[in-house]
Image (cartoon, rainbow, N blue to C red):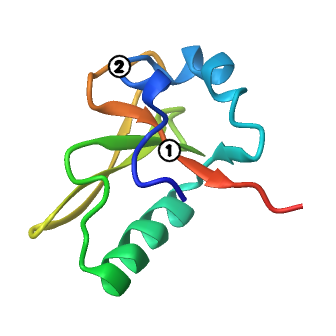
Amino acid sequence: MPKAVAPETRGKNHDNKSNEVDQYSSYETARVNQLTAGIMLHFAKTGERIFGTEYGWCQDKTAGGYRVCAGDFSPDGLVVHRHPPDYTLGFLGRALVRKFS
């Protein structure tokens, strides 16, 4: 799992990111359980906090149609949140994980 969101996707809403991620053919958008587990396991192994100042969009949707994102990993914990798919924020981008065949 990359240590940060795909740079080309920062500050763009979830629906406008699909073309930017196409260049990462061996990766796919993370599910929230993959992203949160990856962040926590990396910290447990290395002591390094990744996704400390940014949030990653995930594949998951809430029952209301909002997209789930996670990040802002600080000593206070890891934040899981949701936003409408057309929401934009400079420190919000797409979280990627390696595809398994």
Q: Position of residue 77 (x, y in %)?
A: 18, 68
Q: Which mark is residue 70?
A: none
Earlier in the chain: of badge 1 and badge 2, it is 2
Q: Is residue 29 left or right of residue 41?
A: right
Question: In what quadrant of the picture does the N terminus appear?
Answer: bottom right
The residue depicted at 37 percent of the width and 19 percent of the height is 87
**In the rendered image, the vertical position of residue 13 relative to residue 74, given as above or below:** above
Residue 41, picture quadrant: bottom left
**Three-letter amino acid code at the position of disc 1:** Ala
Q: Residues within 10 Å of mark 2 (few under 14, many from 20)?
A: some
Q: Position of residue 14 (x, y in %)?
A: 51, 24
Does dot 2 land on a helix, a strand or a loop? loop
Real-space Cα separation, disc 1 to disc 2, in angstroms: 13 Å
Query: Where residue 46 appears, x then y in whole percent?
Result: 32, 80
* Position of 91 relative to 78 (above/below): above
Q: Are marks 1 and 2 in contact (CB under 8 Å)?
A: no
Position of 90 relative to 92 (above/below): above
Residue found at x 45% / y 44%: 68
Q: Residues within 10 Å of mark 1 (few under 14, many from 20)?
A: many
80 or 17, which is in the foreground? 17
The percent coordinates of residue 70 (x first, y second) are 36, 51
User: Which mark is drawn over residue 11?
Assistant: 2
- Is 77 in front, or is 6? 6
Q: What residue is shown at x 24% (from left), y 79% (from top)?
A: 47
| Residue at the extreme left | 76
As drawn, which residue projects farthest toward the right? Answer: 101
State the SS at label 1. loop
Counting the numbered discs, the total is: 2
Q: Which residue is mark 1?
A: 95
Q: Amino acid at mark 2?
A: Gly
